[in-house]
């Protein structure tokens, strides 16, 4: 057991209040984390005690008492403690329920002072429950649905059961590409240039516009391509924000100007001049698409591609929060889901049928929340299905269904390695463009400076003239023809492997096997420059090999009867559980987040019918809480990339929430005083409400009642 050292400085945050309590959170099957809040009564008790502080970890015995499985001394002065369970602890395979008791030991006696919540430990092997199958209810048809197998909206795209069965007879296997498009909400209207806003600009130039262009090509050529794209609410808000789209248009203009200068600079080079010409033509086309073809509204183009049958667009939680860490306050999880669903409906015109769970993170009971929000399916990593309560009869090549009726699709590990891995996967090929060698670092600052951070810091421009070459600093010039030959080679290899898998599995299955290929969308184009061309090439090749590109909704419409089992708590992060989002670099976030969640729920319930002013304050408090809950901040803190910015964002949003909440809590306190009439609805302040609303302006239709009704 290991603490954060007592007295270690932490970022200034609102201090959680309320009665003494201890919160237990799972990190992985062998490790847990707990923190505690002390009140005056506990402080007095500790002051009178002369024993040794001790943590006792207990495991629930089904049908029997709780059994101690580990105990160790700890220090009450530490804000939190990590607990590593010993190998000999029973139930190591997981799936059991655990809790912690904190107290004082004197001799052989132990006096418990705090008892934690109960958590379910992740399984490390599948359960042995008997196989049960269930038939999922059919979805309500969408007026723009392209049908199961067709491409194109309207009746020409729809198909009846006979045509579905006919298609299945000629299909060896299904492939479902799931691309997750997400960025944290970064918007700073007070500055003309803000470094972190370029996360969005890079993704738009290198990923989102090229992917939409590829989808346009597939549609124009009548290729029966189906692709699933998650569009997170924070990303959708930025893609439609006039200030950010205006800044991006100016950014594109600067890049096109740089491209013209690069064409001139490299005119005499046989090696680099063709690459400069590539960037010039590419950027001019992207500028034309953004301004003219898409009208600066990429979300509208995504919606149209869904109507045309190329895309199925799925939703996400409001701000990509790591939901297992919020489950201690269930209303906060329900609010994240409810706001995410509402924003999807507002942007796309209909509620999502599927949801990308942030970080593919799962915990026991989440399916009930999803089902109540109308979600039919989600995606988890491979081990979530393989370690389920019952061994999936089709491994990850068919979904399972939870008790609440939510279908769970599992990631294919081979697909992940082939495309994700820069060491053994396609993106590491020596002929592909090198990501890190950029003229923003290579060229004289007097020349490149006008296109970089005005502060003078070096950075990426997107102009890269070298190929990966190998593990060497001596990089060879980039050759576009060689890179496109590698694209063709790798597309053939990917399809051939899917075909071999389908042929191997099909005889033992009652339906074509499904391969779920899940990736961050930003891999394609941003990290892997040739990724969009590779994806388009694969989608063109699949039909030639009796392989069909489908979406999860396509699959469920054709195969509604699936096995029921409970997935294991998990994520798709490093290590497969929660260690990325809960470690000694970011554990300080959770106590104030949980406290803010409790306060938000209490305020939403107390202000049942708020005045317009109170509703505005309450809604903005909700926005600030949601923004503070984003999983991006602990991720950044863990990997040490933009630590100061992530820390500032968490602290700023929690501070704004605290100030807004105090206004409402103060009015509630006043309403309880004699002679007040007991009415808390009339609220004044804070004076800077309008400026806060202008800064964090996402979710314009946010209803604070989602915390109350949850």
Image (spheres, grey):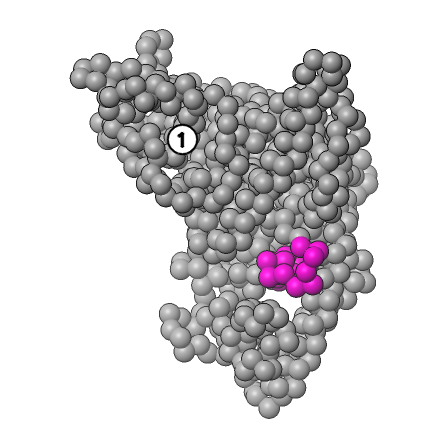
What residue do we see at 62% from left, 86% from top?
Answer: 265
Q: Could you tell me residue 670's position as x and y percent?
A: 68, 21
Asked whether the viewer can see residue 41, the reply is: yes
Q: Residue furthest front?
A: 675
**Horizontal side of residue 499 vs 183, given as left or right:** left
- Residue 171 found in image quarter: top right
Residue wearing tag 1: 35
Residue 492 screen position, x and y as percent:
52, 59
**In the rendered picture of this protein, how many numbered marks are placed on residues?**
1
- Toward the viewer: 501 or 125? 125
Give 616 or 464, whichever is nearer the viewer: 616
Residue 688 painted magenta: no
Give above or below for 614 relative to 191: above
Q: Residues within 10 Å of mark 1 (few under 14, many from 20)?
A: many
Picture quarter containing residue 123?
A: top left
Residue at the spot 39% in from the left edge and 34% down from the top edge: 79
Residue 409 seen by the camera: no
Identify the residue shown where x is 54% and y is 25%: 329
User: Relative to 115, does residue 221 appear above or below in the rendering?
Assistant: below
Magenta-drawn stretch, dominant element (helix, strand or loop):
helix
Where does the N terminus fall, quadrant-wise?
Answer: top left
User: Is residue 199 in the magenta section?
Assistant: yes
The vertical placement of 226 against 54, above or below, is below
- Nearest to the observer: residue 247 or residue 521: 247
Task: From the top left corner, tell me how far across and down residue 252 is, in percent.
Answer: 70, 67
Residue extending furthest toward the bottom: 268
Residue 74, by quadrant, is top left
501 or 334: nearer the viewer: 334
Which quadrant of the figure contains the C terminus?
top right
Please state the extent of the stretch shown in magenta in the rendering: 188-211
């Amino acid at each position: 057991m290991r603490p954060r050292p007592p007295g270690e400085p932490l970022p200034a945050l609102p201090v959680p209040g309320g009665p003494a309590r201890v919160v237990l959170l799972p990190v992985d099957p062998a490790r847990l984390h707990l923190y505690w809040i002390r009140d005056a009564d506990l402080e007095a008790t500790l002051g009178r005690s002369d024993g040794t502080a001790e943590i006792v970890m207990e495991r629930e015995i089904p049908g029997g008492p709780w059994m101690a499985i580990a105990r160790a001394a700890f220090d009450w002065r530490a804000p939190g403690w990590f607990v590593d369970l010993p190998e000999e602890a029973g139930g190591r395979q997981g799936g059991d329920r655990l809790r912690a008791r904190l107290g004082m030991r004197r001799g052989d006696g132990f006096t418990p002072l705090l008892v934690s919540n109960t958590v379910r430990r992740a399984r490390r092997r599948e359960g042995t429950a008997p196989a049960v199958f269930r038939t999922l209810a059919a979805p309500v048809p969408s007026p723009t649905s392209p049908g199961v197998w067709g491409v194109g909206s309207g009746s020409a795209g729809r198909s009846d059961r006979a045509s579905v069965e006919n298609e299945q007879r000629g299909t060896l296997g299904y492939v479902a590409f799931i691309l997750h498009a997400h960025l944290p909400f970064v918007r700073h209207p007070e500055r003309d240039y803000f470094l972190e806003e370029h996360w969005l600009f890079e993704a738009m130039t290198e990923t989102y516009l090229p992917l939409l262009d590829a989808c346009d090509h597939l549609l124009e050529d009548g290729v029966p391509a189906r692709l699933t794209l998650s569009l997170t609410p924070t990303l959708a808000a930025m893609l439609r924000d006039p200030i950010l789209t205006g800044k991006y248009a100016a950014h594109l203009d600067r890049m096109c100007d740089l491209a013209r200068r690069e064409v001139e600079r490299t005119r005499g080079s046989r090696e680099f001049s063709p690459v400069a010409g590539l960037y010039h033509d590419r950027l001019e086309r992207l500028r034309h698409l953004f301004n003219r073809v898409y009208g600066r509204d990429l979300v509208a183009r995504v919606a149209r591609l869904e109507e045309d049958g190329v895309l199925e667009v799925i939703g996400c939680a409001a701000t990509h929060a790591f939901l297992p860490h919020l489950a201690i306050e269930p209303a906060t999880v329900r609010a994240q889901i409810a706001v995410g669903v509402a924003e999807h409906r507002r942007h796309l015109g209909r509620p999502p049928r599927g949801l990308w769970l942030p970080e593919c993170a799962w915990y026991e009971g989440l399916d009930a929340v999803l089902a109540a929000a109308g979600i039919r399916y989600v995606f988890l990593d491979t081990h979530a299905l393989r370690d389920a309560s019952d061994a999936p009869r089709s491994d990850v090549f068919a979904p399972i269904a939870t008790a609440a009726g939510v279908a769970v699709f599992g990631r294919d590990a081979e697909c992940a390695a082939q495309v994700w891995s820069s060491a053994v996967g396609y993106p590491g090929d020596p002929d592909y463009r090198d990501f890190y060698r950029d003229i923003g670092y290579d060229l004289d600052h007097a020349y490149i400076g006008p296109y970089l951070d005005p502060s003078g810091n070096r950075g990426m421009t997107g102009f890269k003239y070298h190929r990966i070459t190998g593990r060497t600093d001596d990089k060879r010039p980039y050759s576009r023809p060689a890179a496109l030959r590698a694209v063709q080679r790798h597309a053939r290899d990917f399809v051939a492997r899917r075909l071999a898998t389908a042929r191997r599995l099909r005889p033992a299955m009652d339906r074509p096997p499904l391969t779920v290929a899940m990736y961050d969308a930003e891999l394609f184009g941003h990290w892997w420059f040739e990724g969009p061309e590779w994806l388009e090439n694969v989608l063109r090749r699949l039909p030639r090999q009796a392989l069909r590109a489908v979406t999860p909704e396509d699959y469920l419409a054709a195969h509604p009867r699936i096995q029921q089992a409970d997935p294991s708590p998990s994520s798709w992060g490093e290590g497969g559980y929660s260690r990325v989002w809960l470690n000694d670099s970011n554990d300080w976030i959770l106590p104030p987040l949980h406290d803010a969640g409790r306060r938000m729920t209490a305020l939403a319930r107390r202000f049942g019918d708020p005045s317009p002013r109170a509703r505005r304050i309450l809604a903005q408090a909700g926005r600030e809480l949601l923004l503070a809950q984003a999983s991006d901040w602990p991720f950044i803190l863990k990997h040490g990339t933009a630590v100061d910015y992530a820390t500032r964002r968490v602290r700023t949003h929690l501070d704004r929430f605290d100030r807004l909440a105090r206004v409402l809590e103060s009015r509630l306190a006043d309403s309880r005083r004699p002679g007040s009439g007991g009415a808390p609805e009339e609220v004044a302040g804070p004076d800077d409400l309008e400026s806060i609303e202008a800064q964090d302006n996402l979710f314009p239709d946010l209803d604070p009642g989602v915390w109350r009704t949850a």
